[in-house]
Amino acid sequence: MLYLIMPLIDRIVKFSLTHRFQTHVIFWLIVALLFMNRYDIEEYRQLDSIIYRQIYYISITMLASYFLAYLIIPKLMGSKNYFEVVVYFIAGSYLISACSRIAVIYLLEPLIRTPPFAQESLWEILSDLPKLVTHYFALSFSAAWVFAFVKLIRDQYVVQQRSLMLEKEKAETELKALRSQLNPHFLFNTLNNIYSLSLMNSPVTSKSIAGLSEILDHVLYRCNTAYVPLSSEIKLIENYLELEKLRYDERLQISFEYVTDNQAAIAPLILLSFVENAFKHGASEDAGNSFITITLHMRNGHLSFMVNNSCIEEDLEAGGSGIGLGNITRQLELIYPSRYELMVKRVENTFEVQLEINLENT
């Protein structure tokens, strides 16, 4: 039910902001219709008398409503001197109530009542506080509280929506900045490796260029959306690994296994960031028996991704993760709040990262 109500509220608020005059007219027409049948005195039941009464009532109520909604409430919310606001409210309410009574005695009654009838003097009207408070204040402000409440709720809703929009824009900007941090050393090393292959006229040169082209195409042009197909991310990792194999040859054992039972969507470059981090901290050009093992399982909308790699001693002493995992964790918090679990383990000379994400409804 809520998902049906919220779009309706959004449309009403947008209409009220873009068509302010029409919105006010509609509100006061509704008020006038609601109070159309409230006259019991026989002489007030004539059509012209009803029209005069409605004009009087709507005019006074509008005066009270705009006084309350556009003067008192803003002062109350923005001022620290509440005594001043109370004085404003009492003085304004008294003047509105007095004007209401004067309008009845000297304008409305001569139009709708049958003479002769007695009329109070201005002094009697202004000094009769009990009648002004119990009758005319209540009459003048009867719909004003509703008007002010509706306006207050609408303004708070607008402020909340703007705040949410700013948070969303901030998160999107932060995500773009985080995603732009693809390791530049990878590109530099890959180009050097391809250059070396071209000098040797290696048959894998064209394949390497094609792999790098696919990676750049994916990173530069296909990651502009919030989510991309999981299959494209898998292909990205495969191309990345093929290019890294050119650099390490047999010095590094690389394994990548994946099983998926359906086509899912995932935030771009999240998985590749873990792979990059493994090469940064787990692959040494000088160390032997280095390895990186990557497994990916996708079942029933649940993704399990694990990277296990050897880790050189210097990285173990320094903590092993650097800024890479901090970057990735921040992205996960922005994209999958309460829908992911990240586990990091360090055992002897190995480093293991396991990511679980619920990709349902993505």
Image: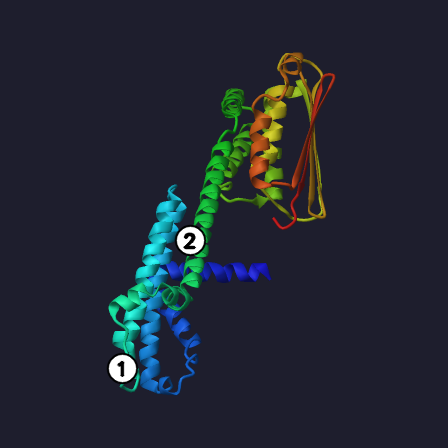
Q: Is the residue 11 above or below the residue 296 in the image?
A: below
Which residue, given by chain and number where applicable, does mark 1 sit on? 111
Disc 2 element: helix
Asked whether residue 95 appears in the rendered view, the answer is: yes
Q: Position of residue 222 (x, y in %)?
A: 50, 42
Q: Quadrant of the N terminus?
A: bottom right
Image quadrant in which you'd find residue 121: bottom left
In which image quadrant can residue 142 be found?
A: bottom left
- Residue at left offset 46%, top offset 37%: 173
Q: Compared with residue 13, is residue 159 higher up or lower down, i.e. above or below?
A: above
| Point 43% across, 81% down: residue | 37
Q: Position of residue 155 (x, y in %)?
A: 42, 53
Q: Secondary structure at mark 1?
A: helix
Q: Position of residue 65 (x, y in %)?
A: 37, 62
Q: Amino acid at mark 2?
A: Asp
The answer to whether the residue labelled 1 contacts the one labelled 2, judged by CB atoms less than 8 Å apart, is no
Residue carrying label 2 = 155
Amino acid at pointer 1: Leu
Q: Position of residue 239 (x, y in %)?
A: 59, 33
Sequence-wise first label, 1 or 2: 1
Q: How packed is label 2: few (under 14 Cα within 10 Å), some, or many (20 or more)?
A: some
| Nearer to us in this view, 236 or 77 | 77
Q: CA distance from mark 1 to mark 2?
A: 40 Å
Using the image, tell me which numbered label, if any, was put on residue 248.
none
Tag 1: Cα neighbours inside 10 Å, few (<14), some, or many (≥20)? some
